[in-house]
Amino acid sequence: MSDRLDQPLSGRRGFGRARGDSDRQGRWSESIARFLGTPRFILWLTVFCIVWLVWNSWGPASLRFDQADNGFTVLTLMLSLQASYAAPLILLAQNRQADRDRVQAEQDRQRAERNLADTEFLAREMASLRIAMSEVATRDFVRSELRNLLEELQAEDDEERSRRRRADDPA
């Protein structure tokens, strides 16, 4: 026997515990829970209850099995039984959905972390490219330097021509 009452016994087997694939049982409970939430189920349950009430109110007295005088006790018990089975199945389906949502949230968080890391890496790369580009001659800089050189060459050429003219001109 366990010394602590707040902890379950370790080797205890559950009475009537279902054996088998818990994922298959989970899918089965989800399919039932999904069906219980459909308009088709509500329509069929409504039709069933109406037929039940009509039969037990106006049907042949010898064939009535749930008396209106007793408040349709059997119908009430059947609906209670259906609700008592539906509630745990719906809870199982919600728990499985919560597990899926938790996994999806974790995957989304990991994806967001990767995206952030990629974005930070790209920002660093862009900054390093900008720094490297500040050391590289740009097209406009090269053009202005070429223009300056061309102007200097033209000025030297003009001076050379004017010197030749003066030398060729006997004044």
Image: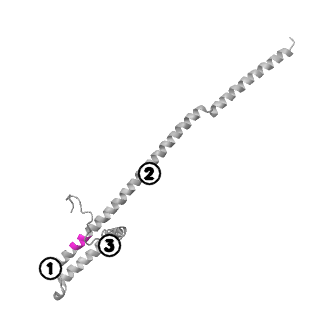
User: Mark 3 = which residue?
Assistant: 40
Q: Nearer the viewer, residue 125 or 169?
A: 125
Amino acid type at circle 1 is Ala
Residue 84 magenta-highlighted: yes
Amino acid type at circle 3 is Arg
**83 is higher (above) or lower (below) than 158:** below
**81 is higher (above) or lower (below) than 166:** below
The tag earlier along the polypeptide, 3 or 2, is 3
- Residue at mark 3 to residue at mark 2: CA–CA distance: 39 Å
Which element carries disc 1, helix, strand or loop? helix
Figure quadrant of the N terminus: bottom left
* Residue 28 as seen in the image, left or right of residue 135: left
Quarter assignment of residue 53: bottom left
| Magenta stretch, residue numbers | 80-85
Where in the figure is residue 51, as x and y percent of width and height? 24, 80
Q: Is residue 46 visible?
A: yes
Figure quadrant of the C terminus: top right
